[in-house]
Image (spheres, helix red, strand yellow):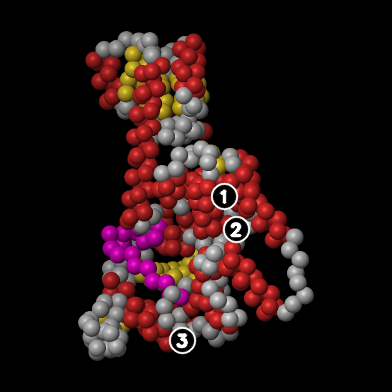
């Protein structure tokens, strides 16, 4: 149970107000008090109270009016009306206007404790259900992108504007910055939301397999093709296809993709019949495609087709004000998924996270929070849970560069990162700021076992 969820007690009788607050604090809850409805609404504007105990009879703004004003600011808050004059009419009015419960003075500590425990257990279950539904459906909207960074807010405003258009979108940014999350937000906020959202990792497959993955194949078109198979473009018909790591596709597939973007039609591998689709294309890359075009590694005509609307996501080190928000979000989500009773993160721990440069961006931050939650024995993550991260940051800042060639330096760096990531190529690539296919090429070139 999240005892850090704040509670508000509103009563013009100081003795009653402080007595109830003291009972709740003894149970371990954080409690604020207000002597009037006006003060209560002011507090609600700055604090997300989980539960508000509100006295019914108060001078000026009474309990019902106070409850309605709090709900305008905090619609998720559970309001409990306190009354010394319990009647059926009072109960009906309170519940009709949005009260979750009402209790009669004099209040008993045990009754208060049981009521709060029951409400917070329900809130925890509701929170877990929301997280689980998102995890199962993988549907994310603009409101699920956590930020107060001005650049990110501009990006969110743009994505809302383009959500219902068919124009191709190119999302650029370092690995782990949340390119797929933004793509899903565009899709699920537009008029294609009830249609498929299909993802393809262009770096994960060879040219032949990727061609079949994208366009499908006919029976007998190659060894093992036992029947007709629809490709991802067909499966995404009416919806959106998200082409991740688009900068890694071969010249042949670049030509094939250009034709699909121009004509919205293609042939399955080994097929003679054209397939027509209505698909919105959102592509993503951590490469500088303009530079790839300049070096003739990427077709300029395909680049311009993809780059109708460009979104450049900032790295986490460029939006440090978002780190506390993201950290708190991951603590809530991961602790719920793992069944750990961890409810927050200390200010000193946040200082460590804010100071770190996050080469793996949001993905690395999430992994670090998960490691801390798994290994922590406290109900709040503190600086001790991230001491190793601080040591790593200091080691990186004081690293003495050895007198070796650039290739040897790169080889050693790859070996060190792989050891740190225990051989996990995906995580190592994210830390190095390159895609997996590039890392595999380097492993082969430097004859590094993994």
SS at badge 1: helix
Residue ID for mark 1: 323
Q: Are marks 1 and 2 in contact (CB under 8 Å)?
A: yes
Mark before the other along the chain sequence, 3 or 1: 3
Residue 60 visible from this viewpoint: no
Q: Are marks 3 and 1 in contact (CB under 8 Å)?
A: no
Q: Quadrant of the N terminus?
A: top left
Give whichever of 308, 252 is nearer the camera. Answer: 252
How far separated are the C-alphas under marks 3 and 2?
A: 33 Å
Residue ID for mark 2: 358
How far separated are the C-alphas under marks 3 and 1?
A: 39 Å
Point 32% across, 56% down: residue: 137
Point 28% across, 85% down: residue: 224
Question: For the magenta stretch, what is the residue range?
Answer: 184-203
- Residue 92 in the image: state x and y as whole percent: 25, 20
- In this rendering, is residue 115 above or below 393? above
Residue 295 visible from this viewpoint: yes
- In this rendering, is residue 221 above or below 330? below
Q: Which of the numbered marks, if any, corresponds to residue 251?
A: 3
Mark before the other along the chain sequence, 3 or 2: 3
- Residue 404 in the image: state x and y as whole percent: 74, 77
């Amino acid at each position: 149970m999240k005892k850090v969820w704040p509670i508000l007690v509103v009563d013009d009788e100081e003795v009653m107000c402080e007595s109830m607050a003291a009972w709740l604090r003894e149970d371990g809850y954080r409690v604020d008090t207000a002597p009037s409805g006006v003060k209560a609404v002011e507090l609600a504007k700055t604090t997300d109270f989980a539960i508000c105990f509100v006295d019914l009879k108060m001078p000026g703004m009474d309990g019902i009016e106070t409850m309605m004003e709090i709900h305008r600011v905090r619609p998720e808050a559970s309001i409990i009306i306190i009354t010394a004059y319990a009647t059926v009419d009072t109960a009906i009015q309170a519940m009709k206007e949005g009260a979750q419960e009402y209790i009669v003075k004099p209040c008993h500590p045990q009754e208060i404790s049981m009521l709060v425990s029951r409400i917070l257990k329900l809130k925890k279950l509701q929170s877990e259900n929301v997280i689980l539904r998102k995890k199962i459906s993988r549907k994310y909207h603009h409101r699920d992108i956590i930020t107060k960074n001005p650049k990110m807010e501009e990006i969110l405003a743009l994505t809302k504007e383009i959500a219902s258009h068919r124009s191709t979108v190119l999302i650029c940014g370092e690995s782990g910055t949340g390119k797929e999350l933004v793509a899903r937000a565009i899709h699920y906020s537009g008029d294609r939301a009830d249609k498929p959202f299909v993802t393809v990792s262009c770096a994960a497959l060879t040219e032949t397999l990727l061609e079949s993955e994208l366009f499908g194949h006919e029976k007998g078109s190659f060894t093992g093709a036992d029947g007709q198979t629809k490709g991802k473009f067909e499966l995404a018909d009416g919806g959106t296809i998200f082409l991740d790591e688009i900068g890694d596709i071969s010249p042949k597939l670049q030509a094939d993709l250009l034709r699909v973007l121009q004509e919205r039609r293609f042939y399955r591998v080994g097929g003679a019949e054209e397939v027509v689709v209505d698909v919105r294309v959102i592509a993503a890359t951590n490469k500088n495609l303009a530079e790839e075009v300049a070096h003739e590694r990427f077709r300029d005509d395909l680049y311009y087709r993809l780059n109708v609307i460009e979104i450049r996501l900032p790295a986490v080190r460029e939006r440090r004000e978002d780190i506390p928000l993201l950290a708190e979000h991951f603590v809530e989500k991961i602790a719920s998924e793992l069944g750990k009773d961890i409810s927050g993160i200390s200010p000193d721990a946040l200082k460590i996270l804010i100071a770190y440069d996050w080469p793996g961006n949001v993905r690395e931050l999430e992994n670090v929070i998960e490691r801390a939650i798994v290994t922590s024995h406290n109900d709040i993550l503190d600086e001790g849970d991230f001491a190793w991260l601080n040591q790593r940051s200091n080691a990186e800042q004081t690293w003495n560069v050895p007198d070796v060639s650039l290739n040897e330096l790169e080889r050693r760096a790859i070996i060190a990162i792989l050891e740190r990531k225990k051989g996990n190529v995906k995580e190592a690539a994210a830390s190095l700021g390159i895609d997996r296919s590039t890392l595999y090429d380097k492993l082969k070139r430097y004859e590094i076992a993994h």
